[in-house]
Image: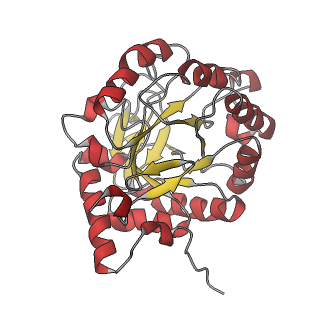
Amino acid sequence: MSPAASPLVIDAAGLRFQNPLLLASGTAAYGRELSGVMDLNVLGGIVTKAVSLEPRLGAPAPRVAEWSGGMVNAIGLANPGIDHVRADDLPWLAANVRGPRVLVNVVGRTVDDFPAVVGALDGEQGFDGFELNVSCPNVRAGGLEFGADESSLRAVVAGCRGATRKPLFVKLSPTLADVAGAARVAVDAGADGITVVNTLPGLVVDIASRRPALGFGSGGVSGAGLLPVGVLATAKVRKAVAVPLIGVGGVASAEDALQYLIAGASLVGVGTAALRDPRLPERIVRDLGKWCDRNNVASLADLIGSLEWPA
């Protein structure tokens, strides 16, 4: 079956994805790190690890701890910086990734950092669009995250829109009081799509030492426990905006991915579950195809936003 005839093909933000499954940012590194343990080219896409203007060392170790419902992490947006990514990582992606779309995740300490990164990478090969992580703190706004402040959110997206014609997805936090309203602000400012959700703040305690399990203390909660949160946020945002959505949080099976699609996502990210089992994303793609066959679904795109709320 040709990719064009596959029921898994999804068109979103002017890009054709061979299937809806993406590796979520923070778990996919820059692709090369996972190339020996999974077949990247069967995936719909890869969202890279964060890229900032300058190298960032990140949070102190330990950075990851498991709990019964998933994982908590405090990586601290560690990354080698834009110069390294441009000189080393993007060329590798351009030479080795065939089929999956690549989105570069962008972070910053100030509003101006985001369009600076986007503009500097815009002409490079090896990727197709950007994901703006507006859940990180704006140091000029006293640590308030960009997505929680309407003016900062609008400024970040508008600045990036002026720096590129590539698709822009804006990644929003589940802690926002009005995630649908934030999505509307982002779209009005020029976003082509929305990613929901980022991790939830949480704390895991090492009871032997009576200290936090993470070196930073608290961290971001991901994994199975985040699934209903992400699906609800997706449904809310779907009602508010007409752009494509990437649903992320707790995906560990084709059934989980289908929940996001029915709630309104065009694409679905898998992260924590892939860290535990790097072969899982490939199986999810295969299982989505089998599900379509069993249920006589000609195109997964027909499921997007088909959720029926109770009367």
Tell which of 153 and 129 is nearer to you.
129
Q: Residue at x 48, y 63 (%)?
A: 260
Q: Position of residue 216 (x, y in %)?
A: 47, 28
Task: Estimate the x, y position of residue 163 in percent, counting from the top left.
Answer: 67, 26
- In the image, what residue occupies the spot 74% across and 21% down? 140
The answer to which of 8 and 133 lies nearer the viewer is 8
**In the orientation shown, which residue stands out farthest toward the right?**
151
Residue sitting at 31 percent across and 73 percent down? 291
Query: x, y (%) of residue 167?
Result: 58, 40
Q: Nearer the viewer, residue 274 or 220?
A: 274
Q: How many marks?
A: 0
Asked whether residue 144 appears in the rendered view, the answer is no
Q: At 34% from the left edge and 33% from the top edge, which residue is drawn? A: 209
Q: Relative to 221, is 191 on the left or the right? A: right
What x and y, as percent, mark residue 211?
Answer: 41, 33
| Quarter assignment of residue 141 | top right
235 vs 146: above or below? below
Q: Quadrant of the C terminus?
A: bottom right
Given the current orientation, which residue lies at the most extreme bottom position? Answer: 311
Q: Is residue 6 above or below residue 214?
A: below
Left or right, 244 with respect to 212, comes to right
Residue situated in front as seen by the camera: 91 or 218: 91
Q: Quadrant of the N terminus?
A: bottom left
Residue found at the very far left of the displayed protein = 36
Residue 166 visible in this rendered orientation of the protein: yes
Colour mode of the rendering: secondary structure
